[in-house]
Amino acid sequence: MIKKLTFLLWLFSACVFSQNLEFTVIVKDFDTDLPIDEVTITALRTRQGFLTNKEGVAIISLNKTSDLEFTHYSYKKSIVKLSSLNKKENVVYLEPITQELEEYIITKDHPQEILKKVIENSKSKITIPISLKVYLHEFYKRDNQIVFFNDGLINFQILGNEKNIKTDILVEQNRAVGVLEGDIDADILGYDLNNIIENYYQFKYLEEVLDSRAKKLYDFSVRTYPSNEDYLVIKVVPLSESKGILSDFTVVYDSNKKLIIEVSSYVTPDRLQIYKESMFASRKVYKLEFKNTFRQEGSYYYLANSKEVIGFEKYYKKKSRRIEVKNHMVVTDFNKKTFEYGDKNVFKGKSLINKNTSFFTNYWDVESGFVSTSEEKAIIERLGKGDDENQNKDEIPVE
């Protein structure tokens, strides 16, 4: 018999968040004492996931005692004993690896062929079926000011196999504040939740560097990864003479298991400037970034968190507008067993932006795994009040 979704979500939340151990960590650079953002934090016993914000802050909420693992591409991995995190607010320092130079590796196969094999193996090993408990966090800027925000707790039920992925979305709680106007392109009003997991689990963002033509457009190389001798890095960088919006790609993978640990890309400002100056279209991209972090533990291989950013200039009502959308997704928990639900409970929309706000806890404070900065919280509060005069004063520098 199909269980009622509301009961299942209540039961899931009650199990996960009863008897929680809660505290704050601030992650900083050992050399500079500056906060580090986008540090992936994993509770080794419970496999709960967290991510630091720009202030280096993460609120940890554990349903069982567990040591914590801290990972970031630019820093050495650190495992911190729970017993040492005995304060309400704890500072954790990570050691940078920037002083340890990557070394080029000469390979028998072309790096593109190595990348293809790593992708295919990663696809075959990704854990499906699986239920991912995800916190989604999106900001929208217009002319460098935040005008809209939405977030939510989502369950992704991922079914099928690596060749045919089916995703059902069940929204637990969500909120949306601010005002969106017609100058925001409908095509990027929130990343399409109904295909985003398929894109990530099939590594579709790497497809542009996998065909034979890509060897004429990009330089491929394999390098060492200083913080972990078991990992290697594949760098794919556009050749200077190549034209168009071409991204710089970095793929960190386990050289023994042939599994992707992190994949990221961005288009350099110089390349975007050339593209902008050469185009006469009404929409000109000025920022394009993407990052996926995956985790492998035992028989599990799954998405840990993701970030996507797109910024573009567009003419609207005879005015040039700068529009930017930033999306974070953090997997806070997962279960290899999916639960039963009715079709009416499945969210079929593209994005949460048009879904009516509905929440029964302040999930964004503790349950999210990724808290807004103090500055962002103030802006969200003002957006919620609908005070246009105050909103226009919220200057947010473009990153």
Image: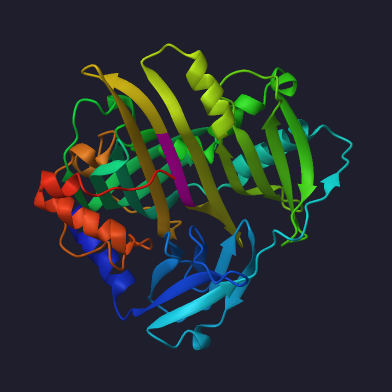
Left-right relation of 137 to 257: left
Give percent across and percent down for residue 55: 42, 64
Q: Residue at x 37, y 47 (%)?
A: 397
Task: Say which of 214 and 272 sits in front.
Answer: 272
Q: Is residue 49 left or right of residue 324?
A: right
Q: In percent of the image, x 33 and y 50: which residue is there? A: 137
Taking depth in this image into account, of 271 and 13 the one nearest to the observer is 271
- Residue 64: quarter of image: bottom left
Asked if the stretch drawn in magenta spans residue 315, the answer is no
Question: Is residue 187 or residue 37 the one in the foreground?
Answer: 37
Dominant secondary structure (helix, strand or loop) of the stretch shown in magenta: strand
Residue extent of the magenta highlight = 305-310
- Is residue 91 found left or right of 374 in the rendered image? right
Q: Is residue 308 magenta?
A: yes
Q: Position of residue 212 (x, y in %)?
A: 72, 19
Q: Nearer the viewer, residue 7 or 294?
A: 294
Q: Is residue 372 above or below residue 106?
A: below
Can residue 358 be seen from the camera position used here? no
Extreme residue toward the top, this view:
280
Q: Determine the residue positioned at 30% across, 72% down.
A: 17
Q: Which residue: 63% across, 58% down?
A: 74
Residue 264: x and y, percent? 57, 43
